[in-house]
Structures are given as structure tokens and as C-alpha cells.
Amino acid sequence: MENGKKVSLVEKLGYASGDLACNLVFQTVSIFLLIFYTDVFGISAAAAATLFLVARLWDAINDPIMGAIVDKTKTRWGKFRPFLLWGAIPYGLIAILCFTTPNFSAAGKLIYAYVTYIGLGMVYTFINVPYGALTSSMTQDPVERTSISAIRMFFALIGGLVVSGVPTLSNLFGKGNAALGYQVTMIVFAIIGTFLLFVTFFTTKERHTIKENNHKVNLSQTIKVLKANSPLKILSLIFILFFATNTISSAVSVYFFKYNLNSPATISLYISSGIIVMMATLLFIPLMLKRIEKKRLLILGTAIGLFKPISMLFLSMPIIFAGNIIGSIGFGIVVGLLWGLVPDTIEYGQYKTGIRAEGMVYAIVGFAFKLGMALGGLVPGYVLEWTGYVPNSAQNNLTLSGIASLVSIIPIVFFLLIIICMKFYRLNEETYRDIVFKLNQKGV
């Protein structure tokens, strides 16, 4: 296939549409599924937390399997794009079922939640591992990859902006029936998301592919790739920390505004204002990269992001919103750069081991991403249970303190750990270009 560097704007927008599709569901799950389970469906916080843990343990098996399948795939549509075509409709259907509340017994509800949530995670893996790896096939140019990643994250944030309206949409569609409101909202999101995944399939191209005589990837080679790929290991740890922080903050903010601030209606404005700032920040990332190297910019973004959880230490709405605005600038920088670093580790691993394993690299990162999400669901659920949380009631002081700690202390600690991790990340742009040059000299 053609190994071109430049990717058209139409193709970049088409590719980014896939992340908008995924985030309509992913962001809804991240922010609202825990409170949907506890306050609408009637599952205890501890049971929901255990479900999130079990689902992610399954992903420990599921993600590498999917990565191996992707790396061995060969179709007339390419290596990665077919999974978007095959997975679009199942993804929409299982998302609807996940936010549907059948009239089962307590045990039946829990079983239903396990089947639908784990099923949603499996279909998400089926789509997201090849979707992420597709970037490495579209271009090898790091600047183009950063551009693709920035546009992709912009569209992901559009998805988040839409999702911030879930409480409003749920009230509109449900007319007081929260269960119906959530279900109809997800039906709308699923229809839009399915269509957008088809858009991604039809507008993207796979240009850079490995030759037929390259290695087939097995478990031992996967371990070899990971052991030799220090940037991938560090990046995976950062993914765990960042998405754990993001998931905890997103999920618990709903509780924080409802119970600590007694202002549940304000959560939509809080989420949407932060996302708008992040979207605006993404527009300036290419300009920032002309002045600041990726690694330093990511550290700077993380440091700025600290303003968000620090503001939560104060029960003052003006301070919280100010911290949200400033901190969201940092969040915008981080999300605009983080996924763009992953493709670079593919060539690094290929250079070190001779094995090019796009699917497996994205499976590893995807697992780190989901493990972060699991921590983000597990920790809040058990904290709520241990502090005596009672759905839809006034909370005791211990519960309120637990909620406040989840949106402030834990994110602050995790963000500081991200900054420390980035100090050990050595794959800069100059090193990467040298690696690609040497690989091309070898004809691989």
C-alpha cells in the first residue's frame, strides 16, 4: 500500500468521528453508570464496584486476545477497518441494553448488569483496539499523528459535551421516569454512534502495513515487545493513572454536586464548561508544540490540571468553577497528546525487537486504559459503601467526606505520580525520527 505521510482533512475528520461515536457511550458509562446503578436500577455501590473489577479482570484476557486477532487479520478492507464495520451495530445494541432496567429480582438485576456491562466492554474492545491501531497505518509522520490525535480528541470532547446533557435529556425523555429517560437517551446516542462508526470505515485508508513475511505475534513475543519497550511501559502506567483519575472525578462529581453542594442541576454546566475549555485548548496544541516539546508540554498540562481537584477542597461554587476552567486547560493538553504518543511506541518496539505489533500495542494500552477505568469505578463504589451511602437521601458526614476525598485528594496524588512517570519517558521526537529512518533503511 501507499506509505504516504500526509492525511487529508476529510480523512482526519472521518477518523475522529469514530471517537465521537465511542465517547457517546464511553462518557455516559464513565460519568453516569455508577449513579444509574445505585440510584435508578437499585444495585448497591459495593456490588457495582465489584462488577467493574470483574469486568476489567476479564479485559486482562480479552484485550490481548483481541490484539492478537487484529495482528493476524487480513481482508480486502485492510487490517483494522473491518472491525468498525462488523462491530458498529452490536455496539449500539448492547449500549442500549446496558441502560435498560428490566423488572427482575435483586439477583436477576445483578446478573443482567454483569452480562450487559461485560458484553459492552467486549464489543468496545472489538472496536477500539483496531480503531486505535489504525492511526499507525494511516501515517508514520509524528506531526501528522499528533494532528490526527488532536482532532480525534476534539471529537471525543464533542461526545463528552453531548453527554454532559444526559441529566437534561433524561428528564426530557423520561418526564420524571429516570429509567425510561436513560434508556431513550442511550437509544439516541446508539443510533448516532453506529452511523459515525460507518463514516469512519468508509473515509479512512490504511497506508503503512507490514510485509507478509513478518513475524506472527504470539504471547511470548508480546511479553518480549513489552519488556523491550520502556516508553510503552511508562505510557501504560500513565494511562492507568490518568484514566483512573478521570473516571473517579467524572463519576463522583455527580454525587458531589448532588449531596455535598446540594445542587444536582449544576453538574451539567460544570461538565460542559470544562469540556468547552478543553476543546478550545486542543485548537492551540499545534502552536504549543512549535514552542514546547511533547514531553514537557504533557508535564505542564498535568501540572495545570491539578487546579481542578485542588478547587474541590473548597465548598465554594465560584472557586470550584474557576478551578474547573483552569484545570480543564491542563486536561485538554493531556488528552490532546496522550493518544498521539502511542503510535510512536510501535516503531520503537519494532526497532528493538524486529516485531511490529500494532494490535498488541494498542491492546496493552487499551488494557491500561480500562484498568484505570476499573480503579475509577472500583474505588468510588467501595468508598460509598464503606462510608454508609444511602441512595436518594441526605448523607452522613463520613459519606460526604468520602465523596469530597474522591474528587480532590486521590486525583491530586495520581496527577503528581503522572508527572514523576513522565520524567522517565525518553522517546522524544528526534529519537523517533531516527528510529523510523533506520527502519525504512532496512525496508520494513
Image (cartoon, rainbow, N blue to C red):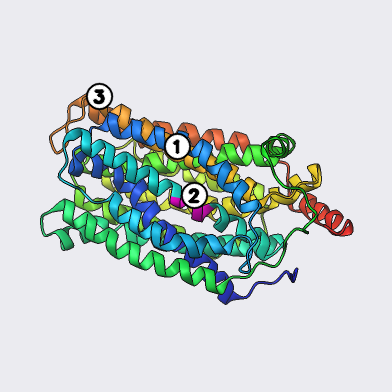
Could you tell me if residue 118 is visible in this image? yes
How far apart are the alpha carbons under marks 3 and 2? 34 Å
Asked if disc 1 and disc 3 are in contact, CB closer than 8 Å, the reply is no
Q: Residue under circle 3?
A: 387
**Given the image, on which type of amino acid does mark 3 rest?**
Thr
Magenta segment: does it hold 127?
yes
Residue 277, by quadrant, is: bottom left
Of callouts 1 and 2, the N-terminal one: 1
**The C terminus appears in which quarter of the rendering?**
bottom right
Q: Specify whether residue 7 is painted magenta.
A: no
Marker disc for residue 56: 1
Q: Position of residue 51 (x, y in %)?
A: 34, 34
Residue range (magenta):
123-128
Task: State left or right for residue 255 relative to residue 85.
Answer: left
- Residue carrying label 2: 125
x, y percent for residue 438: 86, 54
Q: Residues within 10 Å of mark 2 (few under 14, many from 20)?
A: many
Q: Secondary structure at mark 2?
A: helix
